[in-house]
Amino acid sequence: MTDQIERDPITGTETTGHEWDGIKELNTPLPKWWLYTWLACIAWAAVWCFLYPSIPYGPSYWHGILGHTNRADVDREVHAVAVQRSAVMDKIGTMSFADIRADKGLAEAANTAGRITFANNCQPCHGAGGAGAIGYPALATGAWIWGGKLEDIQQTLIHGIRSGDPEARDSQMPRFGIDGVLKPEEIQHVADFVMTYYGTPRKDATPAELAAGAEIFANNCAACHGDKGQGGREFGAPRLASEVHLGGHTRQDVINQINNPHMGVMPYWNTRLDAATIKSLALYVHDLGGGE
Amino acid sequence: MSRISPAERKLQLQREAEGDHLYANRIRVYPKSVHGPVRRFKWAVLILCLTVYYILPWLRWDRGPGRPNQALLLDFTHRRFYIFGLEFWPQDIYYLTGLLILGAVFLFLITSLAGRVWCGYACPQTVWTDLFMWVERLVEGDRNERMKRDAAPMNADTLWRKIAKHSIWVAIAFWTGGAWIMYYVDAPTTVRAFWTGTAGMGVYGFTALFTASTYLLAGWAREQVCTFMCPWPRFQAAMFDEQSFIVTYQKWRGEPRGHLKADTHEPHGDCIDCGACVTACPTGIDIREGVQLACIGCGLCVDACNEVMTRVARPLWLITWDNLNRQAAKAQGHIVPVRLLRPRTIIYASAMLIAVVVMGIALSQRPTIGLSVQQDRAPLFVRLPDGSVRDGYTIKISNKTQADTDFDLAPEGLGGATIALSETHQDRAATLRVKVPADDVGTLRVLVVAPDQSGSKPLTFRLRNTQTGETTANNVAFVGPARSAGAPR
């Protein structure tokens, strides 16, 4: 090794003196600006660690002297949104349905709030757009069981149906089959008769069978479901003379329902949603296309 | 600019001399002032362009109460373009395409006829560079004085002149950048807001941006924009032919060039090689080298040369506008006629005519009514208690007229179909009447009910403006269940 630093003859750059298989490494030091930027980054990181949550130790961690948490950020933002919305939602909560309707801006806000609340809470049972499903009432069709006025919908939302709420809508359909009120062949006859209301009567049902069914219907069913199958809202008895069927479309569905009735439960929402949201929801459901 | 040592500079020059260089330093251009008809015409165009630019946003145009009264307003916030009596919605954007096509073809036509008159006179880069050069000349003196000043060491006099020049440039740039904003917002209110500090960040930000770009492009970049940045000079050669009039040095007349000397008897041409055309050129080229990319066709060399020709008592227009064909003929000593009508110009002119006619028809037939229909997807349909089928649609009605208008919306193509708003779905009728405010879009959800239907059927929504009678239609599908009511299940 000489004192003279070797230079690469082609580029004129100094070499480091390291050599592998005849290839010599050139000495190209890092640019100064790069070095200082790097050092500044290290200093910045140190300051950052001091200010913000950073180093874990055992069960806890260094919280940083600014006391910053992301959770608090979210809480603050959620609160800010609630405050921002309160101006509109307070109005919806106190105004009458008619007044909300008359104010285009409020009506749009209520519709939006209703749509989102519906998607989050109601859609799993009642279907998108309130199309309904077997056992779950179709809200968009006008086939109401307890009433389709805004106030009726609001009442159902607040207290529910068979929900355990003291003011819940409540009714029972007798268990005609398993409690022995009707004999099996009587159930067959009345089911044949109900299918005429459904518009799809059993083709080989004889007039005598239908007449027997009609009589059983008049004695056992008409009190709640109406003498023409038009339904009875005070009892929550669904309309039978309809194309919209809560319990299913087939004769077997009808027999099952008479034999051992399925009675759905609608939860009460007054403990989960505030009054303004329930009102918005009532407006939204009403405007799906079935409201009265 | 990075400083380089004399040794490195020497090496660089040596490489450049050998043709072995990847870059060259900019050679600063010090254009000399000229006087003459071309210069006067150029001033006139400059004043006209700047006047239009600064005045246009301040013109008012009454559009009725509650509507913008600015004659030319490109309102991005509310998505409306107002151009005097015309109003454009975002859907009308293809008129802009038409306008751009028209502009491009017009530029092609002019270029093939008369060369780069756009570059030389009307291009904003040219106009503002010219204005900035005028300021420079006013403050720092003409070419020779400026060169001397820049070569000499800095002194107090040079310093204050430089500061004054840049201050005026920045002031003009600010005025220019500020005026640009006025096309997009209401001018009087924005100017007030600007100076009271209440304008939005957008206004301040864009004013700063356009101020900076004007200052840099017109003050510093100048001819480099035309030579290196602008794509137009690159493909304008495709528009030229041997019949295009361009700024031309009449070589057959000028050559062989030579200085005037009383004692010489050698025959020489009219060009006395004084260099006036070179020093006058704002892009620093020598027009005697023929047509070239950096020539913007401004013709200031024509004025410069005419001045000299007058002084040496030679015929004027040694540098003139002419085409290659005529020059070739003149060199042979005869005159050929000018051909303005040639396939190229005829094609450009017809393309322009077609564009104008199409645009004109489209504009005059522009609908003031718009209908868009989107079918509800969930649920696609519902069966009603009476067995009929109902589909929901979200409808948008555009009312582009200036009056609150009643529209009639009717579902057609399905026997016995009725329509209603979803919030008043019991009031079903064959047609639905909807009021849409002036210059607005009404959004509504409608329900169409048809007697027992199965499968998918075509449905036409027909919309009619009850005041003008204008109609439009939109074809959609009406979807029902796979089976009709009453069918065995």
Image (cartoon, coloured by chain):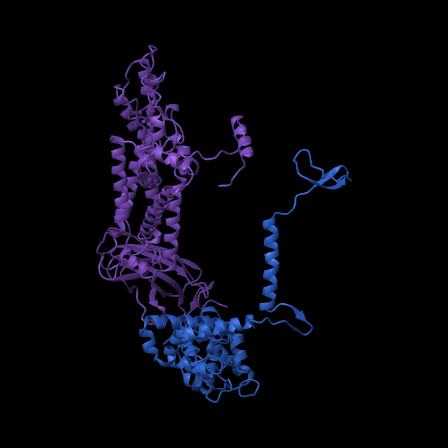
Q: Is residue B389 above or below residue B49?
A: below
Q: Is residue B85 above or below residue B480?
A: above
Quadrant showing the C terminus of chain A: bottom left
Front residue of A29/A243: it is: A29
Compared across the picture, whether A149 is left or right of A13 comes to left
Which quadrant of the figure has residue A274?
bottom left
- Count of numbered circles on the image: 0
Front residue of B365/B439: it is: B439
Residue A149 visible, this angle: no
Compared across the picture, whether B280 is left or right of A209 comes to left
Q: Can you give x and y, in whole percent of width and height, for residue B325 in the image?
A: 33, 20
Q: Can you give x and y, in whole percent of width and height, for residue B173 in the image?
A: 34, 47
Q: Can you give x and y, in whole percent of width and height, for residue B78 in the image?
A: 34, 58
Front residue of B268/B295: it is: B268
Q: Residue furthest front?
A: B156
Instruction: Identify the residue at horizontal 24%, vertical 58% (top origin).
Output: B402
Q: Report which colour depicts chain B.
A: purple
Front residue of A249/B110: it is: B110
Q: Residue furthest bottom?
A: A166
Q: Can you give x and y, in whole percent of width and height, for residue B59 in the image?
A: 23, 51
Q: Residue furthest top?
A: B265
Tell me the blue chain: A
Quadrant showing the N terminus of chain A: top right
Compared across the picture, whether A24 is left or right of B461 comes to right
Q: Is residue B272 above or below residue B57?
A: above
Residue A167 visible, this angle: yes
